[in-house]
Image (tube, rainbow, N blue to C red):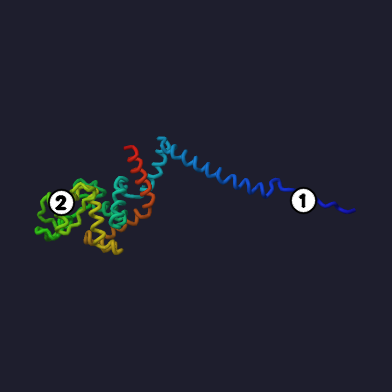
C-alpha cells in the first residue's frame, strides 16, 4: 500500500507580511521609547521618586572618609577646563589642605591662607620686596587681593569670578589659583607628582594627594553627573 505524501504546512505569516510588521514596529518602538522618557522625567519630579534617585547617588561617596561637597564639583570642573588640571586632583588638594574648607581656621600656623592654603608670597608673587623664607611676607590686604599687583610680582592668585579681586578666602578664586599653580608646576607637562611636590615639599603629602586623587577618579563620571544635574536643577528653580 502506498503512503500519501503530507502537504507542507503554510506559514501563518508570509515573509512579506513579516517584513511589513517589522517596518511598522520601528516607528512604534521609537514613539513608545520617547513617551517613556518623557514620563520618567516627570516621575523624577515626584518627591518620593526624587528621594530614591538621590539616595542612590549618595552611595557613590559611601567609601570616602569625607564626602566631596557637591557644590564644589562644578567649580573644580570649570578650573579643569581652563587650566587642564584634573578636577579630581583639585578636590584631593582641597581635601588634604582644609578638609573641604571645614577647618576651624583657614590660616595655618606658618601663615598659609584660604581654602587651598597659599603662602602669601606664592599667591601674590615672590618678586614682592617683602618675600623671603617660607613666604609669609609683609603684604597688605589690598595688595594681596589686587590682580594687577599679583601680575606685577608674578603670583598665582586668580580672580575667577570677575569681581576685580583675587582672594584666597573666596572658594572660586582659591580653586582656580590652585589649578593655575599646579598647571605651571608640572601638570601641563603631565608631571603630576612633580606638581604636587612643588605645592608642598613632602613625600608624604604627595602620597596623600595621590591616594585621594585615585579614589575620586574611580567615580569621577558619576560624581560629575550628579553635581551638574543638581546645579542645572537649581538654575531652573532660580
* x, y percent for residue 99: 26, 49
Q: Which quarter shows the C terminus?
A: top left
Give the total number of marks visible in the rendering.
2
Q: Residues within 10 Å of mark 1 (few under 14, many from 20)?
A: few
Horizontal side of residue 88 vs 199, given as left or right: right
| Residue located 23% across and 50% down the image | 160
**Residue, far top:** 47
* x, y percent for residue 130: 9, 58
User: What residue sits right under mark 2 in the picture?
Assistant: 146
* x, y percent for residue 198: 22, 61
191 is higher (above) or lower (below) than 27: below
Q: Quadrant of residue 197?
A: bottom left
Horizontal side of residue 97 vs 214, given as left or right: left
The front one of 191 and 133 is 191
* x, y percent for residue 35: 49, 40
Element at badge 2? Answer: loop
Q: Residues within 10 Å of mark 2 (few under 14, many from 20)?
A: some
Instruction: Give the mark nearer the N terminus: 1 vs 2.
Output: 1
Element at badge 1? Answer: loop
Q: Is residue 238 visible?
A: yes
| Residue located 30% across and 45% down the image | 71
| Residue located 14% across and 58% down the image | 153
User: What residue sits right under mark 1 in the picture?
Assistant: 8
Amino acid at each position: 500500500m502506498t503512503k500519501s505524501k503530507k502537504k507542507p504546512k503554510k506559514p501563518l505569516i508570509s515573509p512579506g507580511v513579516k517584513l511589513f510588521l517589522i517596518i511598522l514596529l520601528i516607528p512604534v518602538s521609537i514613539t513608545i521609547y520617547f513617551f517613556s522618557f518623557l514620563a520618567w522625567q516627570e516621575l523624577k519630579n515626584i518627591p518620593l521618586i526624587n528621594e530614591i534617585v538621590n539616595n542612590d547617588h549618595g552611595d557613590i561617596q559611601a567609601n570616602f572618609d569625607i564626602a566631596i561637597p557637591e557644590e564644589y564639583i562644578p567649580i573644580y570642573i570649570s578650573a579643569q577646563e581652563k587650566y587642564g588640571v584634573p578636577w579630581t586632583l583639585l578636590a584631593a588638594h582641597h581635601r588634604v589642605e582644609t578638609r573641604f574648607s571645614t577647618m576651624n581656621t583657614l590660616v595655618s600656623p606658618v601663615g598659609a591662607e584660604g581654602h587651598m592654603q597659599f603662602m602669601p608670597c606664592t599667591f601674590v608673587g615672590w618678586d614682592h620686596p617683602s618675600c623671603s623664607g617660607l613666604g609669609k611676607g609683609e603684604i597688605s590686604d589690598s595688595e594681596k587681593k589686587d590682580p594687577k599687583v599679583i601680575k606685577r610680582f608674578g603670583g598665582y592668585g586668580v580672580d575667577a569670578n570677575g569681581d576685580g579681586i583675587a582672594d584666597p578666602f573666596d572658594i572660586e578664586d582659591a580653586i582656580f589659583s590652585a589649578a593655575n599653580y599646579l598647571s605651571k608646576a608640572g601638570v601641563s607637562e603631565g608631571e603630576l607628582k612633580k606638581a604636587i611636590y612643588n605645592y608642598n615639599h613632602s613625600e608624604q603629602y604627595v602620597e596623600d594627594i595621590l591616594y585621594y586623587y585615585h579614589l575620586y577618579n574611580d567615580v569621577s563620571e558619576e560624581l560629575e553627573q550628579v553635581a551638574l544635574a543638581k546645579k542645572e536643577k537649581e538654575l531652573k528653580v532660580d
